[in-house]
Image (cartoon, grey):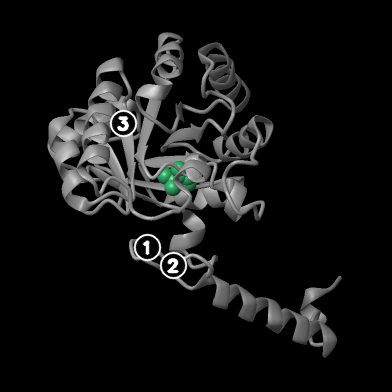
Amino acid sequence: MKTLNFPRITTHVLQEMKLKGEKIAMLTAYDFSMAKIIDDSGIDIILVGDSAANVMAGHKTTLPITLNEMIYHASSVMRAVERALVVVDLPFGTYQGNSREALNSAIRIMKESNANAVKLEGGREIKDSVDRILSAGIPVMGHLGLTPQSINKFGTYVVRAREEEEAQRLKEDAKLLEEIGCFALVLEKIPAALAKEVTENIKIPTIGIGAGSGVDGQVLVIHDMLGINHDFSPRFLRRYHDLYVEMKGAVELYIKDVKSLDFPNEREQY
Ligand code: KIV
């Protein structure tokens, strides 16, 4: 179902959706063909996530993906999308600790891929980078809670902000990112009650992943929700298909048909 009356999703449309209580649906995409299917289905936001490092390139973490690789994925997605808002992750090492480098990275993404916005992981520690990118007129989505680019600091992918001190810091960071001008926030793998409290206390939309139902929208990695990837089964994931099994079955059938001379048949040749 497409969001009613919105032919093209903008950051203003997302704000209106929050005000009206209409939930926001977001999925990742990394290539032209998948982005076309997802956009034609009526998704509100497509995230060209640095999860491409995992599901497209087979890395164990999101850290190795480069800015050039993100631009390649983002421009492939942009060639397909007509309606969704496209947000692109700034990869690890291209914005932390140096706001000038952050701005240059964001400008490269916007110029070379034609995307609509960027996403950065973190709160107060990246404030200067977010400020500088926003001052260039580039919309920024924040990302708090489990921030996979910090996996070497966390040491594990378990739920974040269960303890009061970390929860308090997250609430303050959410307020800060709202105040400096982010248009939305991803809240990843935090207690549902905390995500709901944050959502009720800020005016910009929150998009949850493993953050319960009290947020303004949901995001999943497309390979996970389609069941292409069997290696990742967190509790928050709902699988809408088992494409691993379906695709493997199709490939096995093709191999059998080739080997048995069943393919190609009379009608499949010139
Ligand atoms: O890279 C990604 O796919 C993400 C989502 C999980 C929010 O950041």
Task: Tell me the quarter of the picture where residue 166 sits.
Answer: top left
- Answer yes or no: is residue 164 visible: yes
The mark nearer the N terminus, 2 or 3, is 3
Where is residue 138 drawn, in percent x and y? Answer: 44, 17
Residue 233 - label: 2
Going by the numbered disc 1, the residue's amino acid type is Leu
Question: Closest to the observer: 46 or 171?
Answer: 171
Residue wearing tag 1: 237
CB under 8 Å between discs 1 and 2: yes
Question: Closest to the observer: 3 or 19?
Answer: 19
- Answer yes or no: is residue 39 visible: no
Question: Closest to the observer: 118 or 19?
Answer: 118
Separation of marks 1 and 3 at Cα, in angstroms: 22 Å
CB under 8 Å between discs 1 and 3: no
Going by the numbered disc 2, the residue's amino acid type is Ser
Residue 184 - label: 3
Q: Residues within 10 Å of mark 1 (few under 14, many from 20)?
A: some
Disc 3 element: strand
- Say whether mark 3 is within 8 Å of ligand 1: no
User: In the image, is 130 to the left or to the right of 236?
Assistant: right
Disc 1 element: loop
